[in-house]
Image (spheres, rainbow, N blue to C red):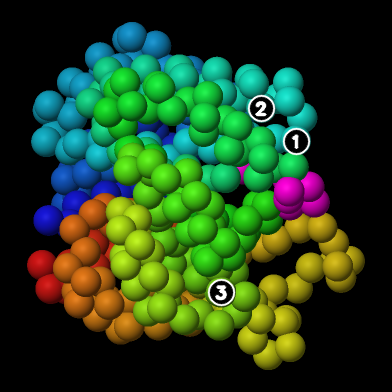
């Protein structure tokens, strides 16, 4: 059974993390995926949540019927700087404690290294995985990895190889639709990427939002000044406001009988967040034939 979860990113500036569960219920969602936020786990920082926060979140879940299905932390655990990597491993250990208290058994995250030191970052990521293996296995928590624009691994095939190289059942893969053109260097061949992750037995989550192809029309979909600056731009738009082949995405997920997590992760449209997230839920439900 597919679980459709709301990433409440567009609500974090206007309400507490606890209240985003109430908002999710109002919008018709039964699950949330909690992405980085100051109340709980901010990018690269030690999680701020304490016992009182956990109790409030559990009570909100009980009151609303909305489950915290997944967490989506970002920690620099592949940092080439060893002291930083060690600190991020400690952050991971604290997050796993909190996930266990919340009965969250699945976490999605990024490789989070330095694109300009890719080989060193890859070595550091494997080192962090080795150090955290006992923690993940003790808590019985699964980890789903995603390649991300400007990370040391941006391409789907390379990311999937790294996941498989760990050779642990608890490590899977998350396919991110708004990264589809970065994952494929502009090809946008979503069926091939989704099927390859599924056939490897690793596809456990799909992030859903739309995006334009940054490689199309001589690469000027996004304009960066000065040209060649060491940055990467991408978007998380509502389905239909981009160029992802959604008919193929949904047809492929139906064909493989996908039964993992679908995360609704539209960002940057706060003034229309409610209407967008309602439409996203309806479009995904229809697209998957639920």
In the image, which residues are magenta? Answer: 112-119
- Whether residue 122 is visible, yes or no, is yes
Taking the view exactly as shown, the residue that stands out farthest to the bottom is 217
Which of the marked residues, 2 or 3, is nearer the chain's N terminus? 2
For image coordinates 31% across by 21% down, the residue present is: 138
As drawn, the label of residue 85 is 2
x, y percentage for residue 34? Answer: 37, 38
Disc 1, disc 2: CB below 8 Å? Answer: yes
Can you say whether 191 is above or below 53 in the image? below
Q: Hey, which quadrant is residue 255 in on the image?
A: bottom left
Say what secondary structure mark 3 lies in.
Answer: loop
Q: Is residue 204 above or below residue 110?
A: below
Residue at 40 percent of width and 54 percent of height: 173
Q: Earlier in the sequence, mark 3 or mark 1?
A: 1
Residues 217 and 156: in front is 156
Residue 76 within the magenta-colored segment of the rendering? no
Residue at which label 3 appears: 184
Q: Which residue is mark 1?
A: 80
Mark 1 is surrounded, within 10 Å at the Cα level, by few (under 14), some (14 to 19) or many (20 or more) other residues, namely: many
Image coordinates of residue 50 in percent, x first then y, are 39, 11
Label 1 – label 2 distance at C-alpha: 7 Å
Q: Toward the viewer: 48 or 24?
A: 48
Q: What residue sits 45% from the left and 53% below the top? A: 164
Compared with 161, 247 (above or below) is below
């Amino acid at each position: 059974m597919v679980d459709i979860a709301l990433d409440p990113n567009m609500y974090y500036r206007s309400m507490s993390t606890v209240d985003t569960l109430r908002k999710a219920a109002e919008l018709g969602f039964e699950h949330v995926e909690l992405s980085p936020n100051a109340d709980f786990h901010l990018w690269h920082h030690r999680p701020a949540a304490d016992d009182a926060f956990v109790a409030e979140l559990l009570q909100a879940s009980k009151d609303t019927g909305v489950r915290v299905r997944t967490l989506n932390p970002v920690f620099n655990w592949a940092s080439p700087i060893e002291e930083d990597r060690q600190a991020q491993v400690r952050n991971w250990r604290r997050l796993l404690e909190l996930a266990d208290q919340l009965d969250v058994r699945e976490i999605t995250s990024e490789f989070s290294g330095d694109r300009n030191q890719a080989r060193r970052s890859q070595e550091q990521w494997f080192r962090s995985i080795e150090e955290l293996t006992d923690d993940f296995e003790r808590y019985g928590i699964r980890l789903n990895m995603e390649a991300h624009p400007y990370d040391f691994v941006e391409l789907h095939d390379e990311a999937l190889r790294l996941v498989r190289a760990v050779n642990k059942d608890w490590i899977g893969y998350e396919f991110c639709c708004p990264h589809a053109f970065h994952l494929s260097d502009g090809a946008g061949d979503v069926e091939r990427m989704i099927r390859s992750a599924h056939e490897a037995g690793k596809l456990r989550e799909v992030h859903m939002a739309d995006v334009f192809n940054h490689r199309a029309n001589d690469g000027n979909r996004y304009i960066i000044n000065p040209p060649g600056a060491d940055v990467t731009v991408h978007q998380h738009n509502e389905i239909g406001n981009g160029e992802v082949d959604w008919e193929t995405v949904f047809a492929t997920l139906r064909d493989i009988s996908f039964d993992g997590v679908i995360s609704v992760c539209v960002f940057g449209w706060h003034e229309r967040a409610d209407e967008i997230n309602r439409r996203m839920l309806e479009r995904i439900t229809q697209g998957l034939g639920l």
